[in-house]
Amino acid sequence: MGSSNCERLVQQDGQTVGVPLGQELCRIFKSRGTFQKRGLLIAGEGLDGSGKTTLMEHLQEYCEAHGQPTVVSNWNDTAEVYNLMMYLNTTGDLTTEMRCIFGAAELAARYHYLILPALQDGKLVLVNKYLVSAFAHALIRGHERKFLSRVYQFALKPDFTIYCDLPPQVALERKGTTGSIGFWEAGLDLAMDVPLEESLRLYQTGGVSAEFLAQNFVKFQTRLRQLHQELLQGTNVLYLDGVLPKETMLKMAIESLERVRAEKLGGALPEPQEASVP
């Protein structure tokens, strides 16, 4: 395994050095300091294929066009942690327990190096799959909610959540046109009566039929959807029908974003700035 999977490169005394990933993540989890939140934290949640990624991208374009600095943070964007997860996945060594902890560590890294600094600078932070997704994927695999609350206690609750709702069967149809069904998103670690290493081997070598894969995708995503709805109860959330036109979803999201911004920060976004004419 290469050093990129177990080290983080940092600048120290003018030189680039590698910091062991375990040491770095411990520092992130334990770090405490003064923090003044000046921006907004918006979470985008929903099943795979529900349109949340596209919506987040369009929201970023809209906000930046109106002079609001905006960053998007995506699920598994921390390359060091994600690469290590994928390495262990291909070797069959990634257990469900390890996947849960790695997921928290991946978010912790993004949280420390991207999300918190952006919020302190007054930026709008759009997180594509946040705590609802993290909790749902862990709960469905048997992890206790109390344990998850401790693991993710470092993370701020979002000011607002945009939930793109989509029937699992529609999500399956979209998967058929945009890409293949992944091992974990079909819940094959729970569906096959064989050790995890063997189920991974069967999936990677084509030993899982398309029909079995599709059936378990719908079953697993249906349970995820139920957990999403349970976890969102009592929160500030906008439910969007994922089958609506993208333009309609964006318009509704902007209206809600403007309302939340006015409530939290005391003002709406300014009008788009026109390019100056030389």
Image (spheres, rainbow, N blue to C red):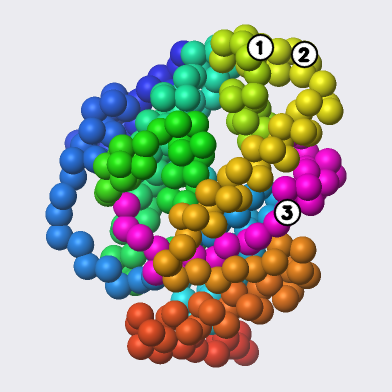
Q: Residue at x 27, y 49 (%)?
A: 154
**Is residue 30 visible to us here?**
yes
Residue to which mark 2 is pinned: 207
12 shown above or below 264: above
Q: Quadrant of residue 99?
A: top left
Badge 2: few (under 14), some or many (20 or more) residues near its Cα, within 10 Å?
A: few
Residue to which mark 1 is pinned: 201
Please tell me which residue lies in front, 87 or 273: 87
List x then y, in percent, for residue 226: 58, 50
Earlier in the chain: of badge 2 and badge 1, it is 1
Say what amino acid the circle numbered 3 marks: Pro
Say what amino acid the circle numbered 2 marks: Gly
Give the mark toward the camera: 2 or 3: 3
List x then y, in percent, for residue 75: 51, 45
Find the magenta span and give its range: 155-181
7 shown above or below 116: above
Please tell me which residue lies in front, 4 or 111: 111
Q: Are marks 2 and 1 in contact (CB under 8 Å)?
A: yes
Residue to which mark 3 is pinned: 167
Mark carried by residue 20: none
List x then y, in percent, for residue 258: 50, 83
